Image (tube, rainbow, N blue to C red):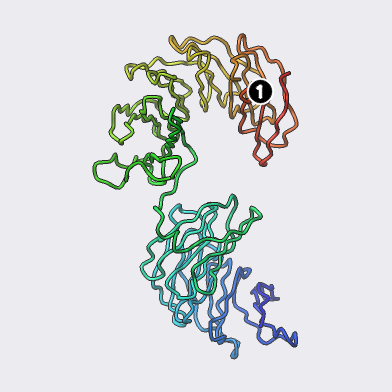
Amino acid sequence: MILINGIPFVDNSYLSQIWDVITGKIIADLMGHDKPVKACSFSPDGIYLVSCSQDCTAKVWNIAKEDWVTDYKGHNGQITSCCFSPDGNNVASSSENIIQIWIALTGQHLYSCESKTASLVLYCTYSPSGDLIAAGLSDFSIQIWNATSCDTLAVFKGHSGWVYAVDFDCDGKRLLSGSDDGTTMIWDVESGQNQELVGLKRDFAATYSENDDIVVVAPDLANRIRIICGHSGDSKFNRSKSQMTPSEECRIRCCTISSTNEIAYGTDKGHVKVISLEGVILHNFPQGHTCSVRWCCYTQDGKVLVTCSDDKTIKIWKEYGEPVVCTGHTDSVRRCKLFDNDTKILSSSHDGTIKVWDARSGKLHFSCDGHKEWVLSCDVSPDGSLLVSTSVDRTAKIWSAENGTCLYTIRGHKDCIRSCRFSADSQLLATGDDQGEIQVGDQIS
């Protein structure tokens, strides 16, 4: 048999049809959903069908009788997928960030599995043994739960788009996933369950030592700083231990690590904190900024920290004393970067400008005005002669680092230009936009 579902009917209800694949004849018409049917699944014995809909319900049908058996009501949004357990006793249905598990023929609710990142569950399925449930999520990951306890057992990351399909192989040892990034991936289920479960935010920093060690610092989903060995991916320490710093009460927006292995980070509430590589709090500035801290960076010797914020200021923290405050931007300051042997600071802002400041006094050297919209990123060429800014106005501008004169305007992107970086020899410039396009050009010769 094969299903064709979600056909609108004359009374504004929606119809699921069951066809005989040999004869092409319709076997059953199942009508009752108020909105389009998103998915459906047969019971293992072929007697029942479960369907789910944008009307926030899932329904079980007796196929031979073409009759409704029960509804599952409890989801708050449209249901994206549904499936029977291998023994036919239970049904799993997904909506928003939750999978609900029901007794198949009574509709009694049993358990709920929640995605770790509060991301949308796009598709769910049981393992052949029925002890696991896997789901594809909108945060590009795959999550696996114990089907009874609803404990998270594994999270697989690797896709760069929404994961719309997942399925186990016949013995449940491997999992296949399909994503709108155009790829399919195969995962080892058992090894995934042995991995440490930690989701990281996109804001991170890394350092490289003379002996080729790599240390990566990143905030996790619990608003804690994770310190990770770059070669192995292992955490430097277990952040669940009682002696480690607790979770922040709000999102960590930025972090950086100094040459002396001190880690600084800023939060959505304007807090600035500094911790050691072992996780010990060294300095705490609850009122570091009055709004979200958007970026932070150290001087090369690790003695000066620079932060910028939605409060329109840049602050220079010399050995963590009273900061020097740079004022002049009229909107959120999103990036700051030290250059010219750490004597100057480049900043970019949603006010459409980039500015250069004295890193000791905080005095403004000059402002580069010319963009029509927010400036989203900036960079300094390695030879220190050029500055670049990119904007919502779809242009990148190259400026003289000596006096702020605009030298070139780069056009050609079809969307906001969100990132930019000079090559190591200062001869090439890469820019990336919101459509995923990266342009590299010899724009400065």
**Percent position of residue 222, x then y:** 38, 46
- Quadrant containing the N terminus in the rendered view: bottom right
Q: Is residue 254 left or right of residue 56?
A: left
Q: Which residue is mark 1?
A: 371
Foreground pick, 313 / 148: 148
Is residue 322 shown above or below 211?
Answer: above
Residue shown at the point (37%, 18%) measured from the top left: 303
Quadrant in which residue 195 is drawn: bottom left
Farthest residue, direction front:
211
Residue 164 pos. (x, y %): 59, 60
Q: Is residue 135 above or below residue 330?
A: below
Image quadrant in which the C terminus is located: top right
* Residue that lies at the very extreme toward the bottom in this rendered image: 65
On screen, residue 49 versus residue 292, left or right, reads right
Q: Amino acid at mark 1?
A: His
User: Element type at marker 1?
Assistant: loop
For label 1, the crowd category at 10 Å Cα-Cα, with few meaning under 14, some 14 to 19 and many 20 or more, is many
Q: Residue 41: where, in percent of width, then height? A: 57, 76
Q: Taking 243 as reference, is 2 above or below it?
A: below
Q: Residue at x 56, y 61 (%)?
A: 186
The number of discs equals 1
Give how far across and how far down residue 178 sits, in percent: 61, 60
The structure residue drawn at horizontal position 36% and vertical position 67%, both measured from the top left corner, is 149
Q: Is residue 182 above or below residue 89?
A: above
